[in-house]
Image (cartoon, helix red, strand yellow):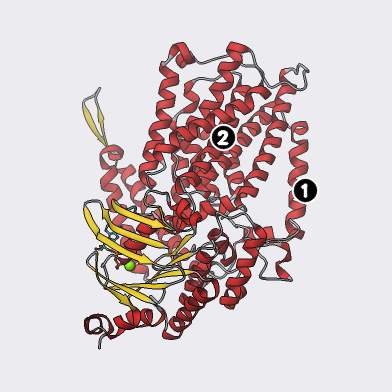
Amino acid sequence: MNIFSELKKSLIVALWFVFLTFPIMVIRVNTIEKIIEWRWRNMLIIAIGSFLVSLLWRYLLTRKQTQTDSQLEKRPLSQLIFEEPKVYKPILVLIGLFVVIFPFIFSSYQINIMTTALMYVMLGLGLNIVVGLAGLLDLGYVAFYAVGAYTYALINHHFGLGFWTILPVGALLAAFFGILLGFPVLRLRGDYLAIVTLGFGEIIRLILENWNEFSFGPSGIAHISRPGFMGINLNLNESIIYLYYLMIFFCLITIFVINRLQNSRIGRAWIALREDEVACQAMGIDKTKTKLTAFALGATWAGMVGVIFAAKTTFVNPASFTFLESAMILSIVVLGGMGSIVGVFIAAMILILTPEYLRAFSNYRMLLFGAVMVLMMVFRPQGIVPNVRRFYRFRRVTSNPGNLYDKSS
Amino acid sequence: MLELKNVETYYGNIKALKGISLFVGDGEIITLIGANGAGKSTTLMTICGITPARIGDILFEKKSIRSLEPNRIVSLGISQVPEGRRIFPLLTVAENLDMGAFLRNDRAEIQKDLDYVFTLFPILKKRIHQQGGTLSGGEQQMLAISRALMSKPRLLLLDEPSLGLAPLAVQQIFQMIQKINSENKTTILLVEQNAFMALKVAHRGYVMENGTITLEGPAVDLLKDERIKRAYLGL
Ligand SMILES: Nc1ncnc2c1ncn2[C@@H]1O[C@H](COP(=O)(O)OP(=O)(O)O)[C@@H](O)[C@H]1O
Ligand SMILES: [Mg+2]
């Protein structure tokens, strides 16, 4: 590469930044003494800083370029790990062990945070069905989460029914809302779908905020019961641990279901639909129904997590269901690698746990968040762990390559 | 088997089919030839219900299918190999074929049809776990035809299967089309720009221009027709 042209470009970038930030970084009007301060030192810092950052940026970009040229054939690390039982089995055992003993070595504060992170794992996996597999950009996912949470909160408040009774109700109701929204909306494509779902999310939140008689408005609903454990009354600490294990259990179920879905005919139909709608129609795949299934399934998951959320915090109000929440869940899916279960897991951990442990930076949270997303999209658009889809292989295939189905299954 | 009666199809306000009538008998190979933009693909899409007809009627085995959803039409026994193949590039050959059998659940029967398409195109069996996008053009066309056959159609609609293929591959595809027709009694409606090849394998043909049918008759007669010779055969 040409060093001089790179330097020149970086210099231009630096000058441009100096120009852009001049009014805010250099000039300061002191209204008390009625003088203007000129802070030239700031200008120098910005010039040098942006020059260096720009150089680094260019360097990384060119390196990425040459890398993709030379390493095109190389399989991703994640794939190598997953395909080698000798490697992934010990890792799985270690993770499993850690997960089981976690509550005994950490404080209830830590357990609580971990439970929250696991909830986001589940939300991410749910949204992953809609966005990652079916390719439908849903920006109002939090609405279904809210439906689940308020279902439990309201029924518990009015009728005193318990967690386990309401869990399926919340899930079904969310699915129902998913279908209700999906029907008119799924005919739309890409960006239109995103906008309509975004609107839907806001509508649900606004209804919850303003319909006082129904949802108790912004003040929300308090004193929601925690989940019971076979009729035994748990104290706060026990119930935190119980919820943690419950979340582990739900996550495992989710992973199991999604894994099955991914390798089922409907899962492949989602991928096919994402690739070519017309070809799918020619194959007799019902476009609307298939998309609706993904949408409703995703919503079901959000509804379930909603119920768990209400039970965990024992308090719900509309502030928990803003667009930011949808954006967070979507970021988990995108950051993790669309369609990838492990990726969603890691991304949820990073996005939920780091802000908790880096409270010192809480003012810059959104800034860091945005920067990380931009960097990700530029340098690793396929996500942390790109989705390694297990191909449609059946056990007998080696002996008879023409066999689509294993006769024993 | 299939009858189109004065069918008109629109894209928005643009009339793409201006009253098409054609008839496909049981077990026939019928070809629909015409220049680019004549409306051949639209005709097939209209039969499949993907771009529904606004006016006219479409009868399949004497029953109207005009207002049915595409998936219903496929389940009745009509299957299309769309123009440009349109296989699913990220799915493997096996998965592509399974998508063709989307509406079926009879595993034993599906397996039988799978074995059948592998006898037609043995190369696909070798490529079974390869992603569709990595196949060559000819192989992709074979996959597209096989995928359509996996729904066990009684009427197969083929849209320009020779498009972009090497002459040898074209030969092979046309041979297989004849074979599918004679072995299975699968009725075939073949859209082609390669009029010569199409008329060679077809029993009867229709010529389309600007959204209307201008000429029809037995393939042997059309091959001798002066107008066709000039316009489509380059003689
Ligand atoms: N999706 C579409 N939207 C609008 N116009 C279309 C569309 N597809 C085809 N057309 C128009 O319809 C006419 C017939 O096209 P088509 O059926 O593809 O022709 P052929 O297959 O004979 O080449 C053309 O004028 C084409 O421009
Ligand atoms: Mg065409």
Question: Of marks 2 and 1, which one's residue comes earlier in the chain?
Answer: 1
Residue A246, how many percent across, how many down?
70, 31
Total count of labels: 2
Residue at left offset 31%, top offset 39%: A25
Q: Which residue is mark 2?
A: A300
Residue at left offset 61%, top offset 45%: A346
Horizontal side of residue A117 vs A108, given as left or right: left
Subunit bearing disc 1: A
Subunit bearing disc 2: A
Residue B40 shows in this picture = yes
Location of residue A226 by image quarter:
top right
Q: Taking A387 as reference, is A331 above or below it?
A: above
The one of A255 and B231 positioned closer to us in this rendering: B231
Give amino acid for label 1: Val
Instruction: Give the spatial CA distance, label 2 vs label 1.
Output: 30 Å
Give amino acid for label 2: Thr
Could you say which disc has been placed on residue A93 in the image? 1
Element under label 2?
helix
Could you say which disc has been placed on residue A63 in the image? none
Residue A81 shows in this picture = no
Horizontal side of residue A64 vs A252, given as left or right: left
